[in-house]
Image: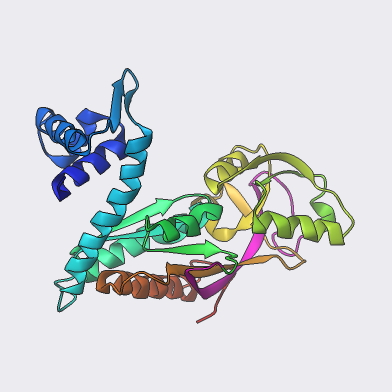
Amino acid sequence: MNLKQLQYFVRVFEMQNMTRAAESLHVAQPALSQQIALLEDDLGVRLLTRGAKGVQATNEGALLYRHAQTILRQVDTTRSLLAKSDTQIAGTVSIGLASSTARMIALPLMKRVKQEIPGVVLEIVDIPSADLTKLVLQGRVDFSLSPDQQAIKGIAITPLMIEDLYLLTHASVKLPAKDVPISQIVDIPLILPSLPNQLRARVDHAFMLARLTYHLFAEASTSAILIPAVREGLAATILPYSSAHPEITNGIIRSHSLDFSLSREISLCASISAPENPAVQKVVSLTKAVIKQLIHDKYWPGCKMLY
């Protein structure tokens, strides 16, 4: 077993297709298949099964994938530790982001990283917020920007910002742009984050305090599903501005501030046991700078910095 074989295996695992994996690695498919076969022979287990729907991992393959990610990340970390300047910093830095946060900062951060540390490849992992710290603990990502993160053993939590929540509706819905009372929301069909979710819990609590019940149209685990429903006029939702920035800018969705307080806290979460890595440290610094600039330029409304 060698690093090249692990890199090849990880790519096949993630793409679930031998041909596409070979193309992305710039190697011939027979050569890729041979390396996977040698890896399986060396370990004495079947890692992948090939079928009409592509390549699927066995249980042993899924286990190897998790360990291979850690091994390859440690190799990148070692390279970064030996770097003596920003121009020498290299490797891959992975960030876990909730879908809403990713829509706001992913592209500006990619541009900034490429400008200042061109040797670093930035990977954005966009998943439901409930799974973000799990990836940090597993070593799948170097750090995450997690909403409403509770204290968890092994994770260092640094609060970054408070983000207000808005009522987001299709542009055709007639409501005041500012300070919508909760009583005007009860008859509007809502699509909300699935429980358990801190944002959803806050919405539920607000309606409970007002002794009102909202009209639940549907639930979804990420804004990648919630926002299209609003865009199509199926329902409204209560989310941060970041989740629908492009649609708000284009006039497809309208954001309405609320006359009752609803917000969430975004924190930077990293493993306490992770070794110091100059590439990760630099990306963390750039992430904070990008967030601060977006808020300062009023590109990201409804936010308050905490650092």
Is 159 within the magenta? yes
Q: Is residue 80 left or right of residue 257?
A: left
User: Is 298 or 262 nearer to us in this picture?
Assistant: 262
Quadrant into which the N terminus falls:
top left
Is 33 within the magenta? no
Residue farthest along the bottom direction in this orientation? 307
Q: How many marks?
A: 0
Residue farthest along the top direction in this orientation? 52
x, y percent for residue 92 = 25, 59
- Magenta-tinted stretch: 152-180
Query: Is residue 19 depicted above or below 247 in this figure?
Result: above
The residue at the point 16 percent across, 41 percent down is 25
Q: Is residue 135 left or right of residue 238?
A: left
Residue 249 visible within the image? no
Query: Is residue 162 depicted above or below 249 in this figure?
Result: below
x, y percent for residue 86 = 19, 75
The residue at the point 66 percent across, 58 percent down is 199
The residue at the point 54 percent across, 55 percent down is 129
Query: Is residue 267 depicted above or below 20 in this figure?
Result: below
The residue at the point 56 percent across, 54 percent down is 130
Query: Is residue 123 depicted above or below 160 in this figure?
Result: above
Q: Is residue 194 left or right of residue 212?
A: left
User: Is 250 or 163 nearer to us in this picture?
Assistant: 163
x, y percent for residue 58 = 35, 32
The quarter of the picture where residue 71 lies is bottom left
User: Is 120 or 32 nearer to us in this picture?
Assistant: 32
Residue 134 visible within the image? yes
x, y percent for residue 198 = 66, 59
